[in-house]
Image (cartoon, grey):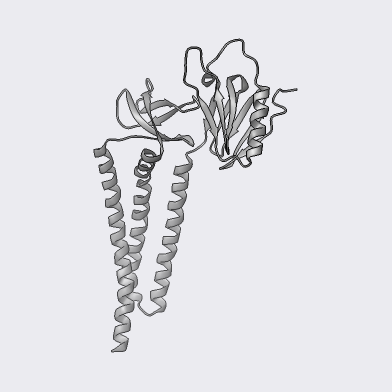
Amino acid sequence: MSITASIPVLHAGKDTVVRPEGEALLVRRPHEQTHIPLKAIGRVRVEGRTVTIELTSAPGTERTHVHRVWDVVDEAAGAAFAEAVNAALPERAEAVDGADLVTGERLYQPSYRDWLRRVKRGSLIATLTVVALCVLVSVAGYPATLIVIIPFGFLALPILALGVWLAFDPYEEWYLRRHGVRTAAIRLQGEGDLYAYPDPGGVVRTVRASVRTWDIEAAYDPRDPGRVVPLRSRSRRIRNVSVVLSVLVVGLAFTAAVVGAVVGAFFFGSFDTLQ
């Protein structure tokens, strides 16, 4: 019988599941999973609804790598999980660096996927709005307004969608500068724009940056260390934001033309009727 047979499955926030698999724990989230052998675990601690899996440290090192499971569904379940894992830990003849034994796989970037989903949803709503305005002015007896609504409305849609899409990188950097953890990322030999950094659990992750230097500063989300951005210079950030704002201003100008045409048709049309 496997020594993990008595370890219960642990459920946590954002569809996180921690379950025994062979002689290891599998921490699985919808977008990534981490494989942690029991021999790499020093102990498991519980603090409220947070379960912390501490890894063993190599001889002579003081830093301890940890994996945190946030928002455990039930505190009692978290305590039972920690007790079962600690009881199942094997005895070690010598200390090892647990981080060297941990592996992980990432499927996609959740924040980017959510951003694209919002862009698509907003584009659909905006398209339906333009179509509804076309129907409205036609039924109201102002078909000439379509000369403005159709070209300007359907020009505004892709321009605004492009502007919102381009805003993802500046927003991510703004968010992670304020709420993330800063770390140094080292250039990978032969990879050009790819830099590596260790997360709190010792997993080596990568981030891309357009600059060419030996190391960069990056910031990652402590709850999702794979969500990371390179920290750019102030001038680079200003330039990126200026591009985004320029695109959005053009899109909003076309939108204002459509709104003005519709309001003008109804206002002046109603005024002429009164006369």
Residue at horizontal 45 percent and vertical 52 percent from the top:
118
Across and down, in percent, residue 190 comes to: 37, 21
User: Which quadrant of the view contains residue 141?
Assistant: bottom left
Q: Quadrant of the C terminus?
A: bottom left
Across and down, in percent, residue 193 comes to: 35, 28
Choose between 225 and 253: the one closer to the eye: 225
Identity of the residue furthest to the front in this view: 48
Residue 134 lies, with reference to residue 156, above or below; the image says below
Identity of the residue furthest to the top in this view: 93
Q: Quadrant of the N terminus?
A: top right
Q: Is residue 99 left or right of residue 176?
A: right
Choose between 86 and 239: the one closer to the eye: 86
Q: Is residue 179 left or right of residue 7?
A: left
Across and down, in percent, residue 157 comes to: 37, 58
Residue at horizontal 32 percent and vertical 67 percent from the top:
258
Q: Is residue 74 left or right of residue 142?
A: right
User: Which quadrant of the view contains residue 80?
Assistant: top right
Across and down, in percent, residue 63 comes to: 47, 21
Residue 4 lies, with reference to residue 247, above or below; the image says above
Q: How many marks?
A: 0
Residue 159 lies, with reference to residue 78, above or below; the image says below
Residue at horizontal 62 percent and vertical 28 percent from the top:
25
Choose between 203 and 106: the one closer to the eye: 203
Choose between 50 and 221: the one closer to the eye: 50
Identity of the residue furthest to the bottom in this view: 275
Identity of the residue furthest to the right in this view: 1
